[in-house]
Amino acid sequence: MDAATLITFIIYLVGMLLIGVISYRLTSDLSDYVLGGRRLGPGVAALSAGASDMSSWLLLGLPGYAYAAGMDALWICVGLAVGAYLNWQFVAKRLRTYTEVANDSITVPDFFENRFKDNSKILRVISALVTLIFFTFYTSSGLVGGALLFEESFGMTYTTSLWIGAIVIISYTFLGGFLAVSWTDFIQGILMFLALIIVPIVAVSKVGGWNEMTNTVGSMDASYLDAFDAGGAIAVISLLAWGLGYFGQPHIITRFMALRSPKDVPTARLIGMAWMVVGLFGAILTGLAGIAYFANDPLIAGDVDNSEKVFIFFTDVLFNPWVSGILLAAILSAIMSTIDSQLLVSSSALAEDFYKAIFRKNASQKELVWVGRIGVLAIALFALILAQNPESSVLELVSYAWAGFGAAFGPVIILSLFWKRMTRNGALVGMIVGAITVIVWKQITGGIFDLYEILPGFILCTLAIFIVSMVDKEPSKEILAEFEAARK
């Protein structure tokens, strides 16, 4: 690697660690560590949510999918854009208000317990358990992305790359908590945005412009340009169903909870959606340009796992070393911005929802912050074990975790905000049904079971909540009064 690229890359890493150190000095209690004291502005909240949402999937997984499958990738982008917009439009403001009304809830399991006045703690514990299970897979996907980056850019072995990337990310999350995560995500979101504008524009111009690119791609395989060649109705529905995942992603909806005011939601929504649409379009364009650019020397045509390096290859062959270093930092930004959020939500589940709820009800704020920090290390270690396989796919790991959260938490979040007849038992059974459906469905293939597991999980979770809530006794007057207070 060129020295200029390496210097640029190192400067970026030092900057991220510096933010972690500064945030460490501003973190005094668990609310600060987990939710930043509810003082995020709309710009930081929007880009932080977007960056933590998209992760390495946006710069590695999606361009790789478009490189391997062509315009089939369009469907997943449509599903995600619609899902993200509906999440900002209907969930963000209501959740920000309700979590404050419901005893100032600072985590998703905390909100569930306070929303349904669950003194048994079972709802909190089960939701925390779901969080830990699926976030371990999600975090693992980011570590795989980091390993691919270091492996390809620095010529390291996969294992060495995996550990170096993990150490950097864990360090600033361990130190600074939510403030470090949100501000680094804000910077990382800007870097990702610029990278997904610059790389596809330069790549398309290098292959002779839009018309020349599409002609080259079409001459290789006409199906690359046919969005309706996605493999039939089940495949298209599966790709669109990704949008359902937004309603249940803890690392995204905690940004809604952390906004300084519900009035900031419209501004944050505008910034977040503009960032997202441009990013998704840029990622697909990068993959299509890759088909044309590497036409005579394909990466590994049709193989999604290996084609996930197409963005990395472009940064190397199209730009001078200084720009290349910035673009590689953007890829690492995408990876870091999601892993740090996932580690933080997982550590908060350990500190607030297991340690305090079950073992140490009178634990001090300082004690809980340190339990959260130790949780970051423990969860990262499990994720590292999962990521040890060099054949791991970023897209595959993300899709499994995304489905798990979308199916287990999505319907519970939506109905808890908009349906006052919903009960604690309905939420509990729905959550379990959604999670188990995803796990079981994933293990079966063929026919209807080729459908993305998030859809059956989401549907069955919703039905379980509705049926159990209707046969259960009505919520107490206290719960109904709080629901009305949050609504108004």
Image (cartoon, rainbow, N blue to C red):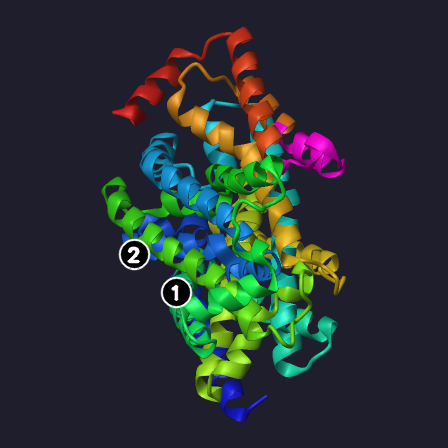
Q: How far from the left and from the top, in percent, is residue 51?
A: 44, 58
Residue 311 visible? The answer is: no
Residue 326 visible? The answer is: yes
> Helix or strand or loop: what does disc 1 sit on?
helix
Quickly name the residue at label 2: 43
For the N terminus, give its image quadrant: bottom right
Circle 1: residue type: Phe
> Helix or strand or loop: what does disc 2 sit on?
helix
Q: Label 1 crowding class (10 Å Cα cut-off): few <14, some 14-19, many 20+?
A: many
- Magenta residues span 434-453
For the C terminus, give its image quadrant: top left
- N-terminal of the pair, mark 2 or mark 1, is 2
Residue 436, numbered circle: none
Q: Residue at x 28, y 49 (%)?
A: 270
Q: Tell me the distance, in whole angstroms, between the alpha carbons under discs 2 and 1.
A: 14 Å
Q: Residue at x 74, y 65 (%)?
A: 390
Image: 473 above or below 193: above
Q: Is residue 168 left or right of residue 87?
A: right
- Front residue of 212 and 441: 212
Q: How far from the left and from the top, in percent, is residue 398?
A: 60, 51
Circle 2: residue type: Gly
Image: 448 above or below 293: above
- State yes or no: residue 446 in magenta: yes
- State yes or no: residue 463 in magenta: no
Q: Label 2 crowding class (10 Å Cα cut-off): few <14, some 14-19, many 20+?
A: some
Principal SS element in the magenta part? helix
Quickly name the residue at label 1: 193
Between disc 2 and disc 1, the foreground one is 1
Q: Residue at x 54, y 81 (%)?
A: 316
Q: Residue lying furthest bottom in this view?
A: 3
- Front residue of 241 and 260: 241
- Front residue of 190 and 100: 190
